[in-house]
């Protein structure tokens, strides 16, 4: 397993909302002792900044004009990922419904994507990392040694999101499913979401989180040309 880190392998995990990207990516990174990067958190932090500064999210030019202002820093320890915005911890507010509802409008702006993709590529530069998002296998890290596209039935994805039960934000499974469908559609039509042709598709609907992590670890280890017996 140590070899995966020594080789500086990059594992790209893309997929729609609630497919299990964050949990699977963190699990894989912990097991293979790799770093972890949540690119969705960066788009969310960017969106939180726009909301805090009363930027008109209906105006793409106005959003773009602020693209360089927010200072976003991410920590890559999978056991405790961190994110700060202008020096402040924003791990709570970026998960709010307000941000979830607004993030697609911000991530659709090309200059926002350019700025964040550059920052993500800087973090990835040294390799040995699991990166999750929507365009990792296609745009951010097209040379990743392992590309996974996670899917799950929309009803199951909404059920999972609902059972997370964000504090103070009781939302029904139906409302979550509608919100996720709207965001997935918006993200894909605005170019924020793409499946790499060479990605391995893992449908997680019927799989436990542990089984998903195991499948991705096994694939990664096989790409590192480690004998399967060494990975037990
Ligand atoms: N295979 C799985 N089986 C059951 N629940 C899962 C599975 N994968 C993830 N979950 C749960 O579903 C929720 C959403 O997962 P998450 O990793 O946040 O998805 P994403 O990052 O794709 O939005 C979390 O509460 C997580 O614990
Ligand atoms: N690589 C990425 C990651 C996220 N995003 C945007 O950020 C939003 C939030 O991403 P996320 O990964 O936190 O969302 P969930 O899958 O957790 O719901 C997405 O809906 C996209 O609009 C993106 O455009 N590109």
Image (spheres, rainbow, N blue to C red):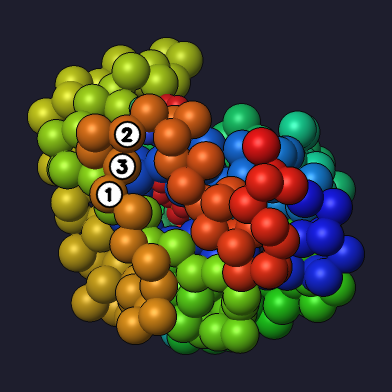
**C-alpha span from label 2 to label 3:** 5 Å
Q: Percent from the top left, x then y, of residue 33?
A: 80, 46
Number of the label disc, if any, that sits on residue 203: 1
Q: Percent from the top left, x then y, of residue 145?
A: 61, 75
Q: Is residue 107 above or below residue 29?
A: below
| Beta carbon at label 2 within 8 Å of ligand 1 | yes
Nearest the viewer among 54 and 47 is 47
Q: Percent from the top left, x then y, of residue 150?
A: 36, 54
Number of the label disc, if any, that sits on residue 204: 3
Nearest the viewer among 61 and 228 is 228
* Quarter holding residue 72: bottom right
Q: Is residue 190 above or below residue 53?
A: below
For disc 3, the neighbor class at 10 Å (few under 14, some 14 to 19, many from 20) is some
Residue pointed to by mark 2: 207
* Quarter holding residue 77: top right
Q: Are marks 1 and 2 in contact (CB under 8 Å)?
A: yes
For disc 2, the neighbor class at 10 Å (few under 14, some 14 to 19, many from 20) is few
**C-alpha span from label 1 to label 2:** 8 Å
Residue 193 seen by the camera: yes
Residue 112 seen by the camera: no
């Amino acid at each position: 397993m140590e070899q995966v880190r020594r080789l500086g392998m990059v594992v790209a995990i893309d997929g729609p909302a609630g497919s299990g990207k964050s949990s699977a990516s963190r699990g894989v990174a912990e097991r293979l002792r790799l770093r972890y990067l949540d690119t969705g958190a960066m788009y969310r932090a960017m969106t939180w900044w726009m909301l805090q500064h009363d930027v008109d999210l209906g105006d793409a030019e106005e959003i773009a004009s602020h693209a360089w202002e927010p200072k976003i820093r991410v920590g890559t320890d999978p056991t405790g990922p961190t994110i700060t915005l202008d020096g402040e911890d924003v791990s709570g507010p970026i998960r709010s419904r307000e941000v979830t509802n607004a993030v697609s409008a911000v991530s659709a702006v090309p200059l926002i994507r350019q700025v964040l993709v550059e920052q993500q590529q800087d973090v990835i530069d040294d390799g040995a990392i699991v990166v999750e998002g929507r365009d990792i296998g296609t745009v951010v890290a097209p040379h990743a040694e392992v590309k996974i596209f996670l899917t799950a039935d929309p009803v199951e994805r909404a059920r999972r999101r609902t059972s997370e039960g964000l504090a103070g934000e009781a939302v029904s499974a139906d409302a979550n499913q509608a919100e996720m469908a709207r965001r997935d559609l918006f993200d894909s039509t605005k170019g924020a979401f793409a499946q790499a042709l060479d990605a391995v598709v893992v449908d997680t609907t019927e799989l436990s989180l542990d089984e998903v992590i195991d499948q991705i670890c096994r694939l990664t280890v096989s790409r590192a040309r480690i004998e399967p017996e060494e990975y037990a």
